[in-house]
Amino acid sequence: MSDFDDEDRSGRSAAHITYALYAVSLFSGLPMFLGVIVAYVTRGGARPRYRDHLSYAISTFWWSLLWLVLGLLLWVVLIGYVFLALAWVYTAWRTVRGWLRLLDERRPPGY
């Protein structure tokens, strides 16, 4: 097997692991932090298609964190529940959409 195949496989595996950790984080938030670490560590050595998926996952993490922080800050005035729900839906949507595109060997949305 050539180096290209190994790099291709490792980037693809990293993207699958990242999406799987994000999916688990929908029920327990901590795995998402592990997922973003995997994405950051492996993104540099991945082929462009998988690098795009890892970048997409990193973007998903930061936007989800923003929605979560807004929700927690506004929780006191009860509108925070809306932001927390939006954070969950946003994370679920981006995780499922990205993972399905990875399974189809397509780039993530927007790339």
Image: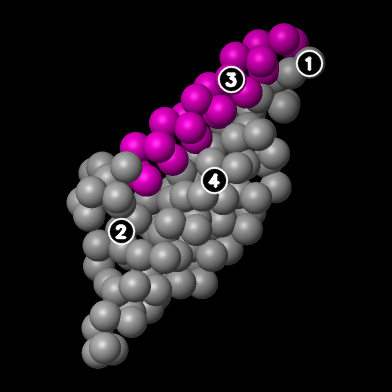
What residue is shown with label 4? 22
Residue at image position (37%, 51%) is 56
Q: How is the image coloured?
A: one colour
Instruction: Point out residue 66 in the picture as x, y percentages from the top left corner.
Output: 57, 37
Q: Residues within 10 Å of mark 3 (few under 14, many from 20)?
A: some
State the separation of the CA atoms marked 4 and 3. 16 Å
Instruction: Tell me which corner region of the image, top left, top right, bottom left or bottom right, holds residue 87.
Output: top right
Q: Nearer the viewer, residue 61 or 75?
A: 61
Residue type, mark 3 in image: Ala
Residue type, mark 2 in image: Asp
Asked if one can make out residue 58 in the rendered structure from this viewpoint, the answer is no
Q: Nearer the viewer, residue 74 or 103?
A: 103
What residue is shown with label 3? 85
What residue is shown with label 2? 52
Above or below — where is 83 with respect to 8? above
Q: Residues within 10 Å of mark 2 (few under 14, many from 20)?
A: some
Above or below — where is 29 with respect to 50? above
Residue at image position (45%, 65%) is 14
Q: Secondary structure at mark 4?
A: helix
What residue is shown with label 1? 76
Residue type, mark 4 in image: Tyr
State the separation of the CA atoms marked 2 and 1. 37 Å
State the separation of the CA atoms marked 2 and 3. 27 Å
Q: Secondary structure at mark 2?
A: helix
Would residue 24 be counted in the magenta stretch? Answer: no
- Counting residues from the start of the chain, the first of labels 4 and 3 encountered is 4
